[in-house]
Image (tube, rainbow, N blue to C red):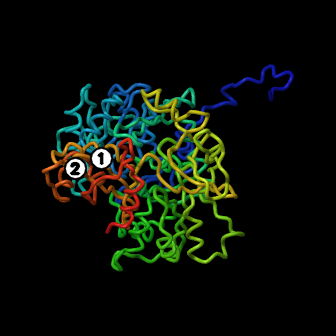
Amino acid sequence: MGWMSDETGLGKRAANYVPLTPLSGLNRALTVFPNRLAVVHGAHRKTYTEYHARCSQLASALTDMGVQSGNVVATLLPNIPAAAEAHFGVPACGGVLNAINIRLDVATVAYILDHGEAKVILVDSAFLDLAEAACKDMRKRPPQIIEVAAPDHGVPASGRHPEYEDVLASGDAHFVWKLPEDEWESLALNYTSGTTGHPKGVVYHHRGAYLNAMGQVLSWRMVLHPVYLTIVPLFHCNGWCHTWMMPMVGGTLVCCRDITAKNIFDAIADEGVTHFGGAPIVLNTLVNAADEDRRAFDHTVEVFTAGAPPAAATLEKIEPMGFNVTQVYGLTEVYGPATECLWDHDRWDTLPPKDRAAVKARQGIAMPFIEDVTVMDETMTQTEMDGDTPGEIMIRGNGVMKGYFKNSEATDKAFEGGYFHSGDIAVQHADTYVQITDRAKDLIISGGENISSVEVEGVLMHHPAVSLAAVVAKPDQRWGEVPCAFLELLEGCSATEDEIIAFARTQLAGFKTPKKVVFRELPKTSTGKIQKFELRTLAQNLG
């Protein structure tokens, strides 16, 4: 179907078919925007010519270190220039980028390095202890550590490992990039805890990353030369693909190592930031900023926010400050944002502020690179689009992952029925806009980070006084949601809230530890299953 009667000689050729890859954006920028500012981080200010050269040097040096096509190169980096350079330099040598969350605990980082079989890891000096401890805990051969020093931020090099700038100096600035022969080739490996305690490796392909980056240009209504502030961690869905997007439009990437209100306002006022993405906690930080941290600016800053829907009160306060907020929704499995609450001026411009904010909190419709986003029931049947009937958000299109690394069973389950099953419960309105009503499988989203309640419960159950544990999300003004633990203690045993939190902190990353602990008998079904919906109701009313 779709072929003409005679297509002799109309096959794919080098002249008319090139595999899609986000690497092509920086190659083009080298020619089109050679002298434009590409990356900013304090005194570090590089043009596209210099940016491309540094990425090429990294690719060359990694090749000299033995990194071959398909090998994994990991990072433990905050939002600094080296993290951006890795997004091009690693795949330019044929490698697969594994950007690891710097907030994880030693055991989880060790698991990720083992599972991904990283050959090299770039590590910021501030996270060197974490990297070294994780490498020591690995079962397989640990990766070569390259240390990225940051003396300007109080974290000089340790001298124990090759330093990043020395490694770059050893590379060839004219290294010929190894572009993919097939756009389905793997580009990045991102681990997400999802709804279980075991991280799953989400594999991105070049095609999906290219289309996601290009599609968000449309969704964000970008014109040439935006100035983008890196608030979304580059280890989270590769910064929502925004680092790959910037060269396509000759934009400037402003790195933000420490996410504070002062740093954000300074970047907007001093660098002319026009765009940034982030969780609602970032909006709250700006709304509640001290007067001495605020700076005046005379342009509108476009903001993509995702995670938990932003509170209506937050939106009402931040928009008059000069920010236009668009709610987006996605997951690691779909390269970051996959839907947008596209604003309908005819219908919504005249709404009262509270009603406008309520509409803006919807997750919306599919972005241009996603084929379909809808809500279905457990039989894969479309739910009624009445804004009331719940179902699961299903996603289909080129912006969906290849699958889970070394986990075909989980991949098959996630793609059952021809759609990616998000695990998020939502309703769909008559205009097809999707709105999340609950989190499936007890996933907690705190400050944009996924927390598995099962993982936290597993740790708490190891406390000698705990008989049963259940963890649910508790609303939090700053983080959106935080873990709240309900515990039944063993007969004759006692424990305090502070003791339980301290115990959890010894085995979990700080953001995963419960922020509230309640001791009580847990509600159960006749079969002994804990009724978490009752606990969620209780958690809503806790101080």
Which quarter shows the C terminus? bottom left
The secondary structure type at the circle numbered 2 is: helix
Question: Could you say which is closer to the camera, residue 464 or residue 516?
Answer: 464
Q: Where in the figure is residue 151, as x and y percent of width and height? A: 23, 54
Residue 294 placement, left or right of 507: right
Residue found at the very far right of the displayed protein = 5
Compute the Cα span from label 2 to label 1.
Answer: 8 Å
Q: Where in the figure is residue 344, as x and y percent of width and height? A: 68, 65
Q: Are marks 2 and 1 in contact (CB under 8 Å)?
A: yes
User: Which badge, 2 or 1, comes first in the chain's sequence?
Assistant: 1
Q: Which residue is mark 2?
A: 504
Residue 54 in view, yes or no: no
Q: Amino acid at mark 2?
A: Ala
Q: Is residue 152 above or below residue 441?
A: below
Q: Is residue 341 above or below residue 76?
A: below
* Quadrant assignment, res 378: top right
* Quadrant assignment, res 520: bottom left
Question: Could you say which is closer to the camera, residue 266 or residue 139?
Answer: 139
Residue 407 in view, yes or no: yes
Q: Which residue is mark 1?
A: 456
Residue 136 placement, left or right of 455: left
Residue 235 placement, left or right of 311: left
Which quarter shows the N terminus? top right
The secondary structure type at the circle numbered 1 is: helix
Q: Where in the figure is residue 303, as x and y percent of width and height? A: 51, 63
Q: Where in the figure is residue 412, as x and y percent of width and height? A: 52, 29
- For disc 2, the neighbor class at 10 Å (few under 14, some 14 to 19, many from 20) is many
Q: Amino acid at mark 1?
A: Val
